[in-house]
Image (cartoon, helix red, strand yellow):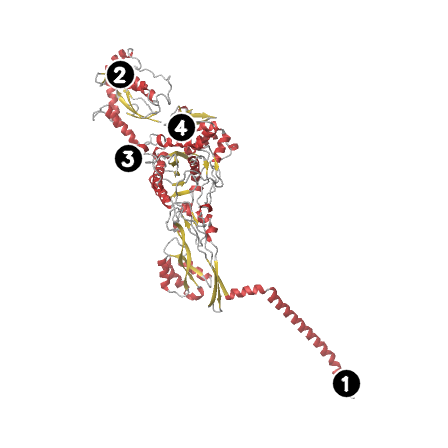
Amino acid sequence: MKPVPRRTLTAPIRRVRFVWVAVFFCFWGLMISLRLGWLQIVRHHEFVERAEKQQQRTFEVAPRRGVLYDRNMRELAMTVLVDSVYAVPSEVGDNRAADAAILAKVIHQDPLDHFTTEQAMLARMNDSHNFAWIARKLDAPTAQRVRELNLKGIYLQKEFKRFYPSGDLAAHVLGYVGTDDDGLGGMEQQFDDELHGMPGHMLTAVDAKRHVLGSVVSEPMPGENLVLTIDSNIQYMAEKALDAQVAKYKAAHGTLVVQDPHTGQILALAISPRFNPNDQRHVDADALTDLAVSDVYEPGSTFKLVTYSAALDAAGVKPTDMVDCQGGSMTMYGRTLHDDKSDHYGVITVQAALEHSSDVGAAKMALKVGNDKFYDYMRSFGFGQRSGIELPSETRGLLRPTRKWSATSVLSLAIGQEVGVTPVQLVSMVSTLANGGTYLPPRLLMREEDKDHDGHLDPQPFHPETSIPSQLPDGAHRVIRESTAAEMRMMMHGIVVEGTGRPAALNGYSAAGKTGTAEKIDPKTHTYSHTKLVASFAGFAPVNNPAIAVAVVIDTPTVGSGYGGETSAPVFSVVAQEILEYLGVPHDEPLKSQKELLAAKTTTEREDSGDEVADLSAMFDDVNSLPQDDPLRAPATAAAMAANRAADAAADAVAQEKADQRAAKHSELSSLSEKALAVFHAGPRGFGAEGSSPDAKVQPVAVQAQVETRGNGSVVVDETKRVAVPQFDGKALRLVVQQAGALGLRVQTLGSGMAREQAPAPGTMVPVGTEVVVRFAR
């Protein structure tokens, strides 16, 4: 039998195999299609970006930062191109350590520069494969030396660097920038977005070996140029005068602000010490603070301008009204308020109280106004709120609402305590008084309305205005009436002419202002320090048509008395004189000689110098015709005083009997010489007006003088008896004459007002009939 063929058995198997293979290939094809669709459709954009990253390089092109100009279009901050050094570590290869050592010797010149040390360079090259910075923004000589090294894998690249042509001029106004051109202070920080501009991009195609095949560049958009209200010349004058005074009085720091009172524009903002924004690496961090807007201090007596303005405007007070200063002491709710220890004023005019900076007088003005109104006036003058000046980190100051006041807070606020202000707030307050009573917010940036008709910023030289603009800027408002402002200007002028501000006097220009001396809080005792003071002066000139307003604040002077009249007022005098002459402001007063100007600036207030006392002693020697060997000639030593007392003791026994006989025969005023009686009866200005009562009685003494007046006018004095010179300080002229006459002494008077100095010193034993020299002042 033949075997059965197998073809009938294998055919179904082949069909099944074919089906499975077909199904497999169909599934495989489907999966491939899905994968290709996923990669080419769903993830297409991702792979395009990855391809671009592998084949192209995109570099950011830094924009040129905008220029900062002063109002005369002088460049204060600009951008220049400099060289930076970078490395491609893959090209440097194994020479990284050697190259780092060579480059450090050329580049690393400053011990404070930790970026360019050998270790720092080597670490950056080891951490990167394609790019590593070696040094940024080098000066031209150093960059040339690196170029001459011609090291493999080391390249130079141009970068923008911020440059300040005038060095530290207006440094706190301009601020500074970091390595990447980011604003870090002042206007640079405040307007960083506007100044920075929009960066551009450079797209470069490379092959597998990183060879450049081509590039496309989108140009960057440069930053906006800004024009400031600062005048570089005025800024330099302010900084020079402030630096000299801070150095002279060895103060911690000082601030000076010059403002146009009719527009609010800041013409100069000086701080001492300053920093150089071109050399940030060596800048002390404390010197970066803009004290004009960030530093708060108690203003002291300069704040009395607010007090008196409120009293004149709201309480109907007039400069000629009388106020009782109570001898320089006032007690309220258990607190005693004292004037300066040398001031003992009685009933005086409101103007005199301001001229001599009486704390008692200021407190009574505030009490007349009332707490709520007084607070409203302080707020209206701009205190306790930000002014809006275009500088970062401005503080609002310190001013508590009335609900948080204590019973005696009004007394403190009246004299500039319990309130914190900034120098910019202070100068804005003075400008308000100068322009007729309208508060204008301070500003540092020229605005759109300052542009010409083409929209360009042209030079805007400062020309003093005589009135405020018809369209007031935002934030401007009336504070006091124009008549009140006019009265305040006249009273402030009296401060410079007759009061504590005499060192602020100008030559050929009238000036007005107010001195201030504030005690700082001692952080250890949390009480007011008697040695750490803040001396200030705020004023304007000329008086009738003010061109500028100036505020000077000197913190912690360690030389001299520390009073504002001695420390800060002279800075105002120097700066205002130079600025007014620079601006060509016409003189409104006759020019004075140097001797006359020195006399006008010599103050007879607390800030007196010891030289004037010596002048009184010389006058005493002259009017009494003392011989050179007379012990009364400047009896400054204990030996001279002892000689006087010995002579007195020897003469006492001889003259006692005669004196007892004469005492009953002479009235109280019979001892006065004809000259003293003439002065007494003539009733000169100031007689009995301040600090004395018409009913004041002088106790008679047991010993009367033997003064004989001859026909030729000469006076013969009985020198057998000596008397002690009384203490005249703080007494009115009438009382001084009466007291001296009762002792048989004559008085040579200088000035008017209250007694401030005398020669010889109190307690000196002098012969009866001696003429005592007394200086009076208001």
Residue 351's disc is 4
Closer to the eye: label 1 or 2: 2
Q: Residues within 10 Å of mark 2 (few under 14, many from 20)?
A: many
Q: CA distance from mark 1 to mark 2?
A: 178 Å
The answer to which image quadrant residue 246 occupies is: top left
Direction from residue 335 to residue 249 in the image, left or right: left
Residue 4's disc is 1
Q: CA distance from mark 4 to mark 1?
A: 145 Å
Amino acid found under the numbered disc labelled 3:
Ser
Amino acid found under the numbered disc labelled 4:
Gln
Q: Residue furthest front?
A: 453
Q: Is residue 217 above or below residue 264?
A: below
Contact, CB < 8 Å: mark 4 with mark 3?
no
Where does label 2 land, which residue?
A: 705
Direction from residue 336 to residue 576 in the image, left or right: left
Question: Could you tell me which secondary element the residue under label 3 belongs to?
Answer: loop
Where does label 3 land, which residue?
A: 593
Question: Could you tell me which secondary element the residue under label 2 belongs to?
Answer: loop
Sequence-wise first label, 2 or 3: 3
Sequence-wise first label, 4 or 3: 4
Residue 216's disc is none
Q: CA distance from mark 2 to mark 3?
A: 45 Å
Q: Residues within 10 Å of mark 3 (few under 14, many from 20)?
A: few
Q: Pick whichever, 576 or 660, lies toward us.
A: 576
Q: CA distance from mark 4 to mark 2?
A: 41 Å
Image location (x, y in percent) of residue 288:
42, 46
